[in-house]
Amino acid sequence: EEPGIKVLSKKEKEKLKKEREKAKKKAQAAAKKTAEGGDAPPAPEPPEEAAGGGKNDKKKKKKKAKKEEDAPAPAAAAAAGKKKGGISALKALMEEKKRLEEEAKRREEEERLRIEEEERQAAEEERKKEEEKQRRKEKEKAKREVARKEGRLLTKKQKEERAMAELRKKALLQSGVQIEGLQQATGNGAPSKKVVYGNRKKKGPAAKDIKEASPAPVSRPETPDSTATPPPQTPKEGSVADDEVKDDWDASSEDESKAAPKAEGIKDSWDASSDDEDSKAPPPPPKPVEEEEEEEEEESSEEESSEEDSDSEDDSDSDDSSDDELTQAQKVTAQRKAEAAERRAKAHEAALAARSKDNLRSPICCILGHVDTGKTKLLDKIRQTNVQEGEAGGITQQIGATYFPVEAIKTKTAVMNKDGTQEYKIPGLLVIDTPGHESFTNLRSRGSSLCNIAILVVDIMHGLEAQTLESLRLLRDRKTPFIVALNKIDRMYGWKAIPDNSFVDSLAQQARSVQREFEDRLQKTILAFAEEGLNAVLYYENKNFARNVSLVPTSAITGEGVPDMIMLLVNLTQQRMSDRLMYLSELECTVLEVKVVEGLGTTIDVVLSNGILHEGDKIVVCGLNGPIVTQIRALLTPQPLRELRIKSAYVHHKEVKAALGVKITAPDLEKAIAGSRLLVCGPDDDEDDLRDEVMSDLTTLLNNIDKSGRGVCVQASTLGSLEALLDFLNVSKIPVSGINIGPVHKKDIMRAGTMLEKAKELAVILAFDVPVDKDAERLAEEMGIKIFKADIIYHLFDAFTAYNAEIIEAKRRDAAPQAVWPCRLKIIAAFCKRDPIILGVDILDGSLRVGTPIAVVKVDPVTQKKEIHELGKITSLEINHKNQDIVKKSQAGGGVAVKIEHAVYQSAKMFGRHFDDKDELYSRITRQSIDVLKESFKADVSNEEWMLIKALKPVRKCRSFRKNAYQTISQRFGIP
């Protein structure tokens, strides 16, 4: 071997040999071609010569001859040249092979791409066909729907009724009865109707012809060429059309689908022209006379099919004719809607263009905060009213609105405007008062969504509380600007009150100790706001209102700081919010509350943010069962500086201008939804559009009502209170079957009475802030229905929660004997071995209770199967001679003395015979006892006890000794 030459393996040698043979064959083929073509054959390649076994002798002879003629050096050079030529030939061979492989790969890739392209095109065509098919289906479905709405699409029964009516009419006309209506409708009277009916009836044989047309080509092969050539084409067309019809008509009946392939002129696609129908009509006439005679004999059976076919033809004709009408109607509707939308857009643009900074509306301010922070008291101080003391429990439970005219604002802020330089651009201030109780989240949310600016009332003595934080989140989510009123500064020890004074002046006159206490409480409040991610600063130190929250210390009792708060509200709104407060003539109105008022019926309290409302306006409101369109009967507002929610002498208006809280009386407002928009339908507006728009933001209460019909009935004075009650019941997982607004009547008792049979504990009416009719109360007492009445929402909660807890406790008492708690015991000592068994035990797992059935698991010596031996129930437990009802594992350090007594029907067991101290004792758990624990005691069972129940599963599956006693004895003693 020469150095640098690779030693080939056996496989490589074989491979090389095969390649050489291939190359040799190719060379021979090429030589053959050239020989046939007249060219000189190419010289044989040296590698092939080396590979050929029979050429070795020739090669040796040539070498010898060369050796004799030439010197040794040229001979060596020739040998080297020969070797080099062999390598180059091998290289050429490898390149040729590589080229051929690449060519094959290229062809394969081209073939693959061609197949993929064909598949893609086929898939695209299939998709287009499917889309076209779907489009046709949708079109036909729309036509059928329009026909159904217009009463043209009849069922089989209706068609039969129509046919019977036609028969009766024909009989009347033939008998000579003159029908005046028909004579007026058709100028010629009865004969014209006879002709029409005659035409309809003549379609009967035609239908028969159509039904029997398919076998006709087979039965009549001898027909002339001129008549024989068209039939093969027409069935094809018919079949194609009928395939389309079958695709289009999902709702077609079996009879119609069977008749369709045979009916060439009747059951065509919707858009088929009358010419096509005429061209397909000729085949039926050439019919044998015998068939016509048979049809006359079987007239009664033919009438039905002919009527069905004629009806279907009439339907298709009428639907075809109504297609253009439908398109026209849709165009008109779309055009009308587009015009209305364009008018509204133009009106909106005109209203925006007419805005001016000199014409501002009243800002809407919402007052929020925790319960009992003094929100209503602050408003009372400004209004000089006593609303808070008149409320049930002194707690606000409804949302209300108060309008402060600019004159009242000037009077209240006179202390802050002694030099008279303050300018008042706003016409007034509308303040919305919200409840602070946790249940009234919905009302706080509603109030915060309406307002332009808010007052967050914080008790300086308590800091930020639960509902304060919730209100803070609502304001931050809606990006509503707000100020903070630090209320109850008069509660600080040693505070000297100066009624209705500005805070800065009052603080300067306080003792140093009071000032220090104020500083301390102020810093705590600022820290609490910082924890919520807000920078809080006293309002007179605030240099950047965009970044910092202003704190205004106030006292609702003495009135100190109230002028500062009002002045800050006025300055912030008219200086920094003038763009939002520019009066807009376009109506913007929101329903605040829905309530029943004695003497007025169901009314709605609305906040008019922009625009004008007139008496007699047609309004559209969102309702529980769809949009409510009604007319305003009266526009009522409370007296100036009076609360909207408090019943008082209302002021009647012909029209009201924003911003204002208004009470609207109108018919059909019972199902109106608070929080929704109120729209006015003008002469240029499209009512359907307004209906759709007002229902778009519907958040219905019906989600909280149990669809199964099981649950309590809830009644409240307002929709807001009703929402709060439903939220509480939803959290408590108490189902609700019915809701209502207004007083409780007999019909409400009857509705609640349906629960007596389903679930007696749910036969309850929760009546919040509504009177109960005396007849209704008497009926409820007779039927056994419980009515809970309360004026304060959480009193109602407490009463119902107590009632619910009592029912649950009663259920637990009833279920207690069936409940078995899991335990595993180890016997320490036996004090009495038999009847009753008294043992000293240690608790390994679980808890031991009086009444727990105890069992022991033993292995039967004959069958070698585990059996449960029931010892009896625990009737007494003692620890250190003290009786116990329940003993847990942690309490039984020194062991527990247990007394086990068996029932009368059980056989007595004896310690030492049936069981001993090596056996463990278990509580006898069954599937029924586990279900009772789940239903009535789930909250009392710990996770460890549930795990123990799972671990005792094999014990529970053991055979009972009592059940298998006879079988065991018979096996032991060989008794058959």
Image (cartoon, rainbow, N blue to C red):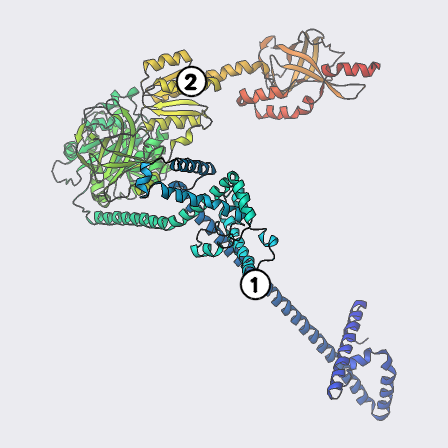
Name above or below for residue 396 compared with residue 142. above
* Position of residue 116 measured from the top left corner of the image (x, y, whole percent): 58, 62
Q: CA distance from mark 2 to mark 1?
A: 72 Å
* Position of residue 228 measured from the top left corner of the image (x, y, whole percent): 56, 59
User: Which residue occupies 86% across, 90% down?
Assistant: 65
Look at label 1 and name its amino acid: Glu
Q: Which residue is mark 1?
A: 117
Q: Which residue is mark 2?
A: 753
Residue 455 visible? The answer is no
* Of the pair 904 and 4, the residue shown nearer to us: 904
Residue 191, located in which quarter of the rendered image? top left
Residue 92 placement, left or right of 716: right
* Position of residue 830 measured from the top left corner of the image (x, y, whole percent): 70, 10
| Of callouts 2 and 1, the N-terminal one | 1
Residue 404 placement, left or right of 466: left
Q: Are marks 2 and 1 in contact (CB under 8 Å)?
A: no
Residue 896, located in which quarter of the rendered image? top right
Q: Quadrant of the N terminus?
A: bottom right
Name above or below for residue 895 compared with residue 742. above
Look at label 2 and name its amino acid: Gly
The secondary element bearing badge 2 is classed as helix
The secondary element bearing badge 1 is classed as helix
Count of numbered circles in the view: 2
User: Which residue occupies 66% across, 15% down?
Assistant: 854
